[in-house]
């Protein structure tokens, strides 16, 4: 594995996207005032700020875009990904749910939901990750390519493990190029847990 991502993920319920981008400064986004720009500009500037690590500014733009066009789903997706950079990650799943309800069926919305649901509903985390990978087996987040299909498969491995679905978790280990544990070994569960943690460290370093 040659992927290098500065993110640590020890268990699915502790998924944090924080650290994927370096923290930005507290300054504004050039050319922008969220109260005077049309919704599309707010959305573009929100993603620009997100990609720069200026999460508070990004949140302001996404919320402005939502206010200007309540029927649009993409600003909710942006708001959700921005939420995942903060401390209240357990509340982020609702933003992605809103994006999907508003028919923003983009893989990025499903991927964000997979991450967020790790703090809310592990079965939904698995389902969301499967949805992304069924569309794009080698998925990469369009606004943060360092987050990709390997992260989603790791989420699935951890979620399955946490649900005591060890065979399914083992299958994800295999999909990641890891060393599947031997189901006939007395230490199967422990070996599987160790291998999932090992893969997590490899993927993110």
Image (spheres, grey):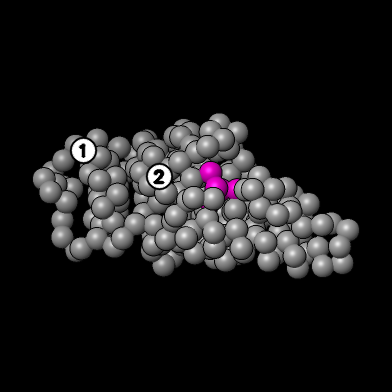
Please give left or right for residue 186 compared with residue 191 in the image.
right
Which is nearer the eye, 65 or 138?
A: 138
Please give left or right for residue 36 compared with residue 76 in the image.
left
Disc sitting over residue 167 in the figure:
none
Q: Is residue 94 above or below residue 106?
A: below
Disc sitting over residue 41 in the figure:
1
In this rendering, does residue 180 appear at all? yes
Q: What secondary structure do most residues of the magenta stretch adopt? A: helix
Magenta extent: 149-153
Number of marks in the image? 2
Residue at 22% in and 44% down: 45
Crowd tier of the residue under label 1, counting other residues whose Cα lies within 10 Å: few below 14, some 14–19, many 20 or above: some
Residue 190: x percent and y percent? 75, 68
Residue at 30% in and 51% down: 50
Q: In this rendering, which labeled residue sits more in front, label 2 or label 1?
A: 2
Q: Secondary structure at mark 2?
A: strand
Residue 202: x percent and y percent? 54, 59
Disc sitting over residue 145 in the figure:
2
Q: Toward which corner of the image does residue 180 lie, by quadrant?
A: bottom right
Residue 175: x percent and y percent? 66, 45
Residue at 64% in and 48% down: 177
In this rendering, does residue 165 appear at all? no
Q: Is residue 189 above or below residue 76?
A: below
Give me the C-alpha separation between circle 2 and circle 1. Answer: 22 Å
Q: Is residue 35 magenta?
A: no
Q: Is residue 177 above or below residue 201?
A: above
Which is nearer the eye, 77 or 200?
A: 200
Q: Secondary structure at mark 1?
A: helix
Quick one: which residue is furthest to the front in this view? 2
Crowd tier of the residue under label 2, counting other residues whose Cα lies within 10 Å: few below 14, some 14–19, many 20 or above: few
Query: Earlier along the polypeptide chain: callout 2 or callout 1?
Result: 1
Which is nearer the eye, 27 or 7?
A: 7
């Amino acid at each position: 594995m040659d992927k290098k991502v500065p993110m640590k993920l020890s268990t699915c319920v502790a998924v944090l996207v924080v650290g994927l981008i370096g923290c930005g400064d507290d300054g504004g986004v050039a050319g922008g005032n969220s109260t005077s720009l049309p919704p599309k500009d707010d959305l573009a500037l929100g993603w620009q700020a997100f990609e720069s690590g200026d999460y508070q500014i990004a949140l302001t733009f996404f919320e402005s875009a939502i206010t200007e066009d309540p029927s649009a789903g993409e600003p909710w997706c942006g708001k959700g990904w921005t939420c995942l950079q903060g401390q209240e990650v357990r509340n982020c799943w609702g933003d992605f749910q809103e994006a999907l309800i508003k028919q923003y069926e983009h893989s990025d919305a499903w991927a964000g939901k997979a991450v967020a649901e790790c703090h809310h509903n592990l079965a939904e985390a698995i389902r969301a990750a499967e949805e992304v990978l069924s569309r794009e087996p080698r998925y990469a987040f369009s606004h943060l390519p360092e987050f990709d299909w390997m992260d989603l498969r790791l989420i699935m491995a951890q979620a399955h493990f946490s649900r005591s679905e060890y065979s399914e978790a083992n299958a994800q280990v295999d999909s990641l190029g890891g060393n599947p544990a031997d189901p006939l070994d007395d230490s199967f569960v422990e070996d599987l847990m160790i291998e999932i943690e090992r893969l997590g460290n490899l993927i993110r370093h």
